[in-house]
Image: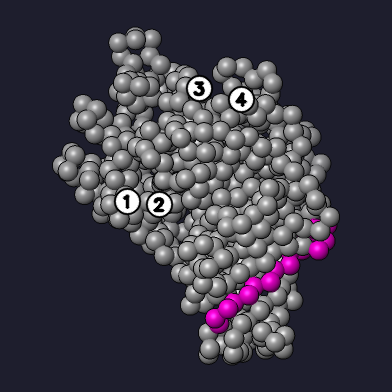
Amino acid sequence: MSASEQAPVPQYQIGSDCPASHRFQVVLTIPAPDPAGQVLWLPDWIPGSYMIRDFARNLFDLQAEDGAGRPVDVQALDKSTWRCAPVAGVLQVRYEVYAWDLSVRSAHLDQTHGYFNATSLCLAVAGQERAPAEVLLQAPAGQADWRVATTLPALAVDARGFGRYRAADYDALIDHPVEMGTFDERRFSVRGVPHRLAVTGRHRGDLDRLVADLTRICAAQIDFFGQPAPFDEYLFQLTVVGQGYGGLEHRSSTSLICSRDSLPSADEPAQPGAAYVELLGLCSHEYFHSWNVKRLKPVELLAPDLQREVHTELLWFFEGVTSYYDDLFLVRAGCITPARWLELLGKQLTRHLRTPGRWRQTVAQSSFDAWTRYYKQDENTPNEVVSYYLKGALVALCLDLSLRAQTGERASLDRLMQWLWQRCLGGEPGVDEALLRQWLQAQVGDALSAPLTAWLHGTEELPWQALLAGRGIDVRLSASEPVTLGVRTQAGEGGVALTLVTRGSAAEAGGLSAGDVVVAIDGLRVSADQWNARLARYRPGDTVQLQTFRRDEWRVVGCTLQAGSCDTCELALMADPAAVRLAGWLTAS
Ligand code: ZN
């Protein structure tokens, strides 16, 4: 059957009569609405970003009419659900969406480009979510040179990419974000699969270098899970800004934001600079998600309710394991050396050591409460929350190295991921902790049963130090400050603003709070630049008088300094080459 002969399906006509006003106009035509009155709803969150975002707050002027152009009543049922009065025949719904959020999670439109996730623009037609839907994408007014970058399957589009697209169902519709504009573009092939890079925003980056590195990373990941790749094409949608960092994974694309300085320069050294390594790690992370979370999923997220929070204890696996593999694939693909990878891991361990919340929250709890804790951070977050990305990656490291050590390299996290993927190809995409335990049991019996319980559901330190030593990696721990108040600081009005007061610290005991501004230590004015050097003059047990302001009110606070803890980690290969065992793990076996 040709496209024109296909049964009529809901169609979203998307355009803008004035991009500078940041408003998309949408016309939704429903050929066969619910005879009892069509319900329409918009997601309150977008898969991959676990926070209620209330996208409907940017939807305005919702109106409906029947096939003869007569107005149809629309009643709001809640903040993101509406019901149209019953009509005979076609129902047409019109609305505007205000698009001025330059993030990977919603929609953005101005004279320079347009970007949207359908979670922001496309009302779901209740009862028809599993049916196909069309998008008629129109070039916004006055933008004759704009082109389109999306992996939405095209039905009939012009040379610039405007025209008709068709998604298999609503789930697919919201999983192919659309970029429109005058982006820089590169096309490349990886293991026979067409890949595309579209870069929005002014820059002077070396995109050929980026493509060369992406090609190696993508090839390594496709080979890891086994050909064929799970998509027919893949798109990296990259927006460059002054300061920014973020990505969101989709089934055959990713939306990324980075600072323009993280693009490779024309003379980028063979061993890339730190900012570029971070960008490659982000690309690697989102690409790995094509398997781990876009196809393999926590059982709770197989068919999620998009209008309320969906809780799972497994984000440590889907984000943490992905975080473990993102940098690992940079070294496996040859983009960085093993020594450089150890530097990156050392920095991650340092961040972990500087998170007091790791003694308070388990990584399973952190996963479960992502919606209201990790995604809604405040000044108390470091005290109470552990990152399921960071601790999850360290659990992955410990699982991987434990399996390798206990089975003489026969079993590993690699084997687990590949087993899960084969199971997914066989029609079983759901993952839960019991399934992971079942596989571990088959590999090593009970050996990892109690440790895994402690790692996921306890707060004691993970055994990364001993496991790294077993591979010939020296762990050097040191204190970043000889004495400490237990605070984090930044420059504040007339002094030093406290951004964190650590639970149980000298500062807390003395009565300091996040938000306080310290203007002097023992009667001497202090600035953020002088802070560390000034405190380093004291010894543990010394009491300092801090002159501070809170809500403009002056207070003097006495604090008894504590010894700094070992909060800094550096890793290095042991001097004895016979002790170093990276083959099969960091490098090819
Ligand atoms: Zn992720």
Reply yes or no: does residue 150 show up in magenta. Answer: no
Q: Which residue is drawn at 53% across and 84% down?
A: 34
Inspect the image, locate mark 4, and give the three-letter code of the amino acid beneath it: Arg
Residue 416's quadrant in the figure?
top left
Please provide percent x and percent y for residue 4. 56, 66
The residue beneath circle 4 is 209
If you read the primary sequence from the N terminus, does the residue marked by circle 1 or circle 2 appear first? 2
Kindly indicate whether the residue at mark 2 contacts the one at mark 1 (C-beta within 8 angstroms): yes
Is residue 476 rendered to the left or right of residue 159? left
Q: In this view, does 89 lie to the left or right of 323?
A: right
Report the coloring of the rendering.
one colour
- Amino acid at circle 3: Ile
- Inspect the image, locate mark 2, and give the three-letter code of the amino acid beneath it: Arg
Q: Name the residue under label 2.
A: 295
Mark 3 touching mark 4, by CB under 8 A? no
Q: Distance between the residues labelled 3 and 1?
A: 31 Å
Q: Tell me, for residue 424, which label it has, or none.
A: 1
Task: Identify residue for label 3.
Answer: 336
